Structure formats: structure tokens, C-alpha cells
Amino acid sequence: STCWMTVEPFEINTFKDFINDATGDVLLFGCGLGYVAYMLSLKDDVTSITIVDNNDDVIELFSTYLLPQFENKDKITICKSDAIEYLNSCDINSFDHVNVDIWYDVYDMIFPYLRSLEVEFNNPNVKFSYWLEGSLKESIQRSILAAICNYPTPGFLIDKIASDIVRDTEIKSYEDVYNLVDIHNLRELLYK
């Protein structure tokens, strides 16, 4: 059995920047145990929070046991929907900030992350953030190093992306390797 949702230091730390930065109307993909929604609801500069989740049990748990305890529950709206379908059907520009947290780990993340990037790039006025994005970047960096060394990898999509990056780059020096691994803009790199 795999633990899917927790509220522990790792989870709290991975959302700290998003919670600090979010203002206005916020869209959350993935409810989790409600920690992010709760922390956002306490902020005076957050006007509304729309939570999109497709799991009936999570929605029921949150709506019945957690949301009633929130001081500012009136800021929160819950929608049952698939995140990608919702992203493609709603007016994303009606939100100021969007956070996507609909995956278990970086390997589960890559397809919905790429789909979300497309929506992000088509809506430049909305600020997007993605849970585990830093971890995804680190995984791609490791896979790039493995591809440079022709080290065998499990063959995940991340490994394929890294192989494509290495194949399309001329490497003649240590500095070339450093520049290749020093990914400045992961979203732009993967969107291409």
C-alpha cells in the first residue's frame, strides 16, 4: 500500500513558496488533505480558492470533516472534475494563481505536467506552480548526466527527454556539460 497524501514537513516545505506568493483568485488542482487550501484561506490577499479534484472520497473527507473547521471556508469552492479536462474547459484567465498537484511522484508527473505547461504558455498572465517541479528538474539533470555517460537507465520518459537533450547538443568541454545540466528554465525546455 502506498501513502498518497500526507501533511508532514516535506509536504509543507514544498508548498511554502506557493502559499507565500499566491494572491487573488487561486485555482488548486488536487485537494490533498486541505493543508494548502487552509493556509491560503487565512491570507487576506487571497480572495477565492477553487479546488478541483476527481476523487469522490477525498472530496467527501474534505467537505465533511475538514472544511467545516476552516475560519474562512466561504472563500472555498470545490469542483469534481479531471484536472486536465478542467484546465482545457475553464477560463484560466479568471484566476491569478494556479497550483497543480495531481501526481504521486516525478515519474507519474511528466504527462500531466506537459499538458499543464501547454495551458500555462497559452495564458501568460496567470502564475502557475507545480508540486515537485524542483524534484523533476533534479531527475532530468541526473538523467542528462547518465545519457552523457551512456549509462543504462530504466527507460522512463524522463530518461528519453534527457537523451533527446544530449543528442541535440554538441558537447566538447566540461563547460558544455555544466551548461547542459544547469537547467535555468525547466518549463521552457520541456514545453519545446
Image (cartoon, helix red, strand yellow):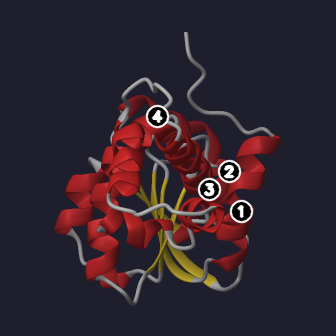
Look at mark 1 in the image and give the residue it sits on.
39
Q: Residue furthest front?
A: 172
Look at mark 4 in the image and give the residue it sits on.
150
Mark nearest the camera among 2 and 4 is 4
Name which of mark 2 and mark 4 comes first in the sequence.
Answer: 2
Q: CA distance from mark 3 to mark 2?
A: 20 Å
Identified at 32% across, 84% down, the residue is 93
Secondary structure under tag 2 reads helix
- Residue 62 visible, this orientation: yes
The N terminus is located in which quarter?
top right
- What amino acid is found at the position of numbered circle 3 in the picture? Gly
Q: CA distance from mark 2 to mark 4?
A: 42 Å
Identified at 51% across, 73% down, the residue is 185
Q: Residues within 10 Å of mark 3 (few under 14, many from 20)?
A: few
> Between 146 and 81, which is closer to the camera in this rendering?
146
Look at mark 3 in the image and give the residue it sits on.
134
Mark nearest the camera among 1 and 4 is 4
> Between 65 and 18, which is closer to the camera in this rendering?
18
Q: Which image quadrant for residue 169?
A: bottom left
- Up the image or down, 158 lies above or below 184; here it is above
Q: CA distance from mark 4 to mark 3?
A: 24 Å
Q: CA distance from mark 1 to mark 3?
A: 21 Å
Identified at 52% across, 63% down, the residue is 172
Name which of mark 1 and mark 4 comes first in the sequence.
Answer: 1
Q: CA distance from mark 2 to mark 1?
A: 6 Å
Percent from the top left, x then y, of residue 108?
A: 41, 35
Q: CA distance from mark 1 to mark 4?
A: 45 Å
Secondary structure under tag 4 reads loop
Q: Residues within 10 Å of mark 1 (few under 14, many from 20)?
A: some
Look at mark 2 in the image and give the residue it sits on.
35
Identified at 34% across, 38% down, the residue is 157
